[in-house]
Image (cartoon, rainbow, N blue to C red):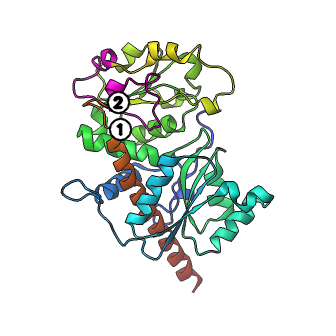
Amino acid sequence: MHIAALHQPSQLQLNQQGNLKHFLTIEGLPKDTLTKILDTAQSFFDDNNNLITSPLLEGRTVMNLFFENSTRTRTTFEAAAKRLSANVLNIDIARSSTSKGETLRDTLWNLQSMAADIFVVRHSASGAAHFIAQTVCPDIAIINAGDGRHAHPTQAMLDMLTIRREVKKPFSDISVAIIGDIKHSRVARSDVAALQTLGCKDIRIIGPKTLLPVGFEQYAPDVRLFTNMDEGVKDCDVIIALRIQNERIESPALSSQSEFYKLYGLNEQRLSLAKPNAIVMHPGPMNRGVEIASSIADGPQSVILKQVTNGIAVRMAVLALSMQGQLQQKSLLAALAI
């Protein structure tokens, strides 16, 4: 799939006041919106960098609709919603009425009738969250928790929050290397879009030719492609390692995992080529000894576990902001109808 496919118009995600009402993709959103998400996420940490609880979603119901498995993303969304005092329902899609022949529309309409306020949707089909927000449940805040190869916007924003909290330099002054299976990665697409929107001018995409996508020309000159790992990581501030998306690869793209590690695995020698204080990130789940060495994943420059904590804060921010945006929109439409 071409990387430019499925860009969503910002007007679908923003209400008439310009505030977030759905969060479907990074593309099309202005810098101010991304900055507001980061600032709101930061506000959910106390002075000791511990996450706080808030009554912002008290009495509201968040439904996690995961048509595709993901323990980490689902549980962090659940933790985020509960920290905002929301009611949380995890819907077992595999055992839902869709498995008995009911259409997706009917399933969603039934769930909407159960006083749902927010749907967190993960689906294997690119564009699924957009379809739901536009044509099925426009009055429910829809949060995209990952759709096919297309987008994973909350992962991108937790990555941006981690970079902002750990590097402590403007995005315009940092170099970011993203390594691995870029072709099949929705995280890579969303990360690149977020970095560019926030002003990063030096983004390095690193991997074998078989795992690099077409379509990155639109991002030039901020994005450069490398097939040589050592050249790509030299003097960078941030390294994001990605796993091989075996479940999305339709034909063999690698000779072997050991060969990939030999050429593109992040080890101590390659990390030494980056800046001395460079941070190492990974969206998980990690394949140790394939894309990253255990000594790096568990080492002093790794912020992988901090990404998980930051993910709760970002998902709290997105849930709160989208709910507020939906309420603003409904209030405006009600006023216009008077």
Indicate whether 142 appears above or below 159.
below
- Determine the image quadrant of residue 209: top right
At a point 27% along the width and 57% down the height, the residue shown is 45
Indicate whether 243 appears above or below 143.
above
Say which amino acid is labelled 2: Ala
What is the x, y in percent for residue 102? 78, 61
As drawn, the label of residue 12 is: none
Asked if the residues shown at circle 1 and circle 2 are in contact, with their CB atoms under 8 angstroms apart, the answer is yes
Report the residue that reaches farthest toward the right: 101
Callout 2: few (<14), some (14-19), or many (20+) C-alpha neighbours within 10 Å?
many
In reply to whether residue 255 is colored magenta, the answer given is no
Tell me the magenta residue range. 268-297
Regarding residue 26, the answer to whether it shows in the image is: no
What is the x, y in percent for residue 47? 18, 57
**Is 27 on the left-hand or right-hand side of 68?**
left
Secondary structure type for disc 1: helix
At a point 47% along the width and 27% down the height, the residue shown is 220
Indicate whether 167 appears above or below 95.
above
**Is 108 on the left-hand or right-hand side of 257?**
right
Q: Which residue is mark 2?
A: 297
The quadrant of the picture occupied by the N terminus is: top right
Q: Earlier in the sequence, mark 1 or mark 2?
A: 2
Q: Which residue is mark 1?
A: 304
